[in-house]
Amino acid sequence: MPKRILEEFKVEWFQLLDECGTLDSSLLSPLLSPSESITKKEIQGFYESMVLIRSFDEKALKLQRMGRLGTYASICGQEAIQVGCAAALRSSDWFFPAFRESGLSILRGLPMKTLYQYWSGDERGSVVPEAHNDFPIAIPVGTHIPHAVGAAWAALYKKDKIAVLATFGDGATSKGDFHEGLNFAGVFSLPVVFLCQNNQWAISIPVSRQTAASTIAQKAIAYGFPGIQVDGNDVIAVYLVVKQALERARRGEGPTFIECLTYRLNDHTTADDASRYRSEEEVTLWQEKDPMRRLRRYLEKTYDWSTSHEEALQQEVNARISTAVEEYESVGPDDPLQMFDSLFETLPKDLLEQRAELKRRIEKEQEGARH
Amino acid sequence: MSKLNLVQAVNQALFHEMDLNPNMVIIGEDVGQDGGVFRATDGLIHKFGESRVVDTPLSESAIIGTAIGMAAYGLNPVAEIQFMGFLYGAMEQLVCHAARLRTRSRGRYTCPLVVRAPYGGGIHAPELHSESTEAFFVHTPGLKVVVPSTPAEAKGLLLSSLRDPDPVIFLEPSKIYRAIKEEVPDEEVLIPLGQARLVAEGDQATLITWGAMLHPTLRAATIMSEQGVYTDIIDLRTLSPLDSDTIMKSVEKTGRAVIIHEAALTCGVGAEIAAQISEKALLSLVSPIVRVAGFDTGVPLPKLERYYFPGCDQIIEAIQKVLSF
């Protein structure tokens, strides 16, 4: 037989909750095991989480404009992915974020104060509390993907029944470490889930300049594991697909790649001006698909979610955020000697002299301040 | 004691530590069944199995990147990179992550990782197999850089590196992988990182070197001693952290310093050593510091290699230069 087809592939697309807030519950059952269901409480919880992280984000942008925060990367428009992932993860799982996952980190239990600290340029903002299996923010794009693979490998080696989640943007899928990391995960069948927040823009570069492939999800096929595309603005779809993938990983069935199609509603960071490279019409179109608006419509239709519920929730969230901002702004200055003291477990003697020099400068400055 | 060459000493250290530390794993290209391209991991897979000695895809950045994740999770990975020139593909992982993980997370995560790579020229290997760019790593705060010069040194320094709580780049001079055999203790002898070794003593000049270059330096010193010139010879062993105390003590005694390395002259580790001597021991000097180093050209292919790397003759000339100033 001189010619035959060796491989064919398909990429599935998931959406359960459409833009009008209508839930296709016929799609629910294949995604849930017979004993499972999604309760009203859970769905309402998703919405509450979205309101919390969007409010955190809005506050961060305001603080930045007032000069009370440094350059900040907004998560606006990507809340459904972050809420869905947080709900699907267990606390024993490990999570490796890029830098547009503030919401997911908050929902995993990272104090909001800590994130504000990070974006203010305080290194203590990278200190994840002891009980949390999360890595600090990764600025170099895509390079944290192999770390997630390594942690999954270590978990497999230690026979820990956990899964690892790595999240990144569409830009990261053009980086070598994305391909090297996914390839390792496939070869060693590791308990890791890769989730791409495809917000369609890497600063000014549209996703069409990142890849000639029609989906990012299909890249997984080349590494020998499933790739799925999900409506990233549909929290229910994200939650169920991520949950399934994490369970698959914990069962030892290997990695999954999930592409969540979404949109970055704000500038890349507060240092960017997106109007230089994309149209207002495009942004408006995606505002219509806003994940929060969609879920609120569903809650209103299905559970009589009312303006008074909304107001009470917003009030409660605002109070939490005010507290976090107060905590962040009342944190004392960092100890500059930490530059040396956390460099190695034991500071080599050749650095003692430099440490002493920094100490001298600090003391001189303090002395100057007293006079 | 057994008479071993440097590869065998590395192999013995790996066996020893794998036996003691169940969290230690070895990953890299051809490290399993093949035992590594230089046979440094020979036989380990048979004793410790495929889950601890893992042949990986040809993927340097992922080898180092996954090792960082493993280390953060609680393992002690040892990553073999086949040649130092292949390590450049993993520079971002080393510089942006391995070196910074402890400090940026304030100790919440650490990176007890050892990266082993053969380095240096002299084995007539193809293009980009003869680099000695240790200065890249010495210039990266948060990494330790170790270079052994003999089989026994290799074993003792590797054992210390394997127990170090921070990332270590362990560079094995491929030229002397098999060129020298010496008695290596069967038992565990740890050589602490950050301590140079005074190999020979004399009061007329200080010769500072490391790795394979120790051997032409020893030859040059022997020839000079026949003419009545006696020198201190310092084998640095660890380039980061640098044992400047040992260097200064010797230079204060001799007043003359010759620094010998294979790597290109400009911004090589020799430049840092010369700067430190001029800062800390200038008034002891009776002659300018002389560096004997590779040229600031790319390392040529093997046919021209002998013109690139300095050898015994250049070291003798340098000693004569500092003596006759």
Image (spheres, coloured by chain):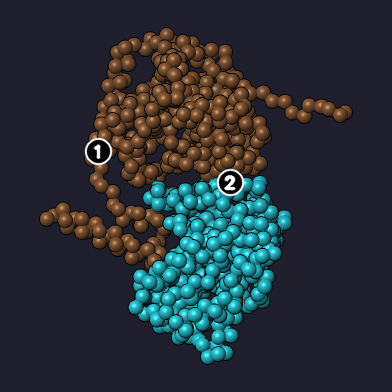
Q: Residues within 10 Å of mark 2 (few under 14, many from 20)?
A: many
Residue B204 visible, this angle: yes
Determine the chain carrying the residue at label 2.
Answer: B
Q: Position of residue B75 (x, y in %)?
A: 53, 52
Q: State which chain is coloured cyan.
A: B
Q: Residue shown at 52%/30% (left/top)?
A: A170
Residue B25 or residue B158, whichever sits in front:
B158
Task: Tell me if label 1 and label 2 are in contact, CB under 8 Å.
Answer: no
Residue A299: name its quadrant.
Answer: top left
Q: Residue shown at 63%/53% (left/top)?
A: B28
Q: Which mark is residue B62?
A: 2
Side of B146 relative to A104 (left or right) = right
Colour chain A is painted in: brown
Side of A45 relative to B312 (left or right) = left
Residue A277: name its quadrant.
Answer: top left
Q: Position of residue B138 (x, y in %)?
A: 47, 60
Element class at badge 1: helix
The residue wearing badge 1 is A329
Q: Position of residue B253 (x, y in %)?
A: 40, 83
Name the kind of residue labelled 2 in the image. Ala
Name the kind of residue labelled 1 in the image. Glu
Query: Height in image: A31 above or below B210?
Result: above
Query: Height in image: A243 above or below A252?
Result: above
Query: Height in image: B252 above or below B169?
Result: below
| Mark 1 and mark 2 on one chain | no
Residue A52 visible, this angle: no
Q: Position of residue A287 (x, y in %)?
A: 42, 17
Q: Residue shown at 77%/29% (left/top)?
A: A6
The N terminus of chain A: image quadrant: top right
Determine the chain carrying the residue at label 1.
Answer: A
Residue A120 or residue B102, whichever sits in front:
A120
Q: Residue shown at 56%/34% (left/top)?
A: A173
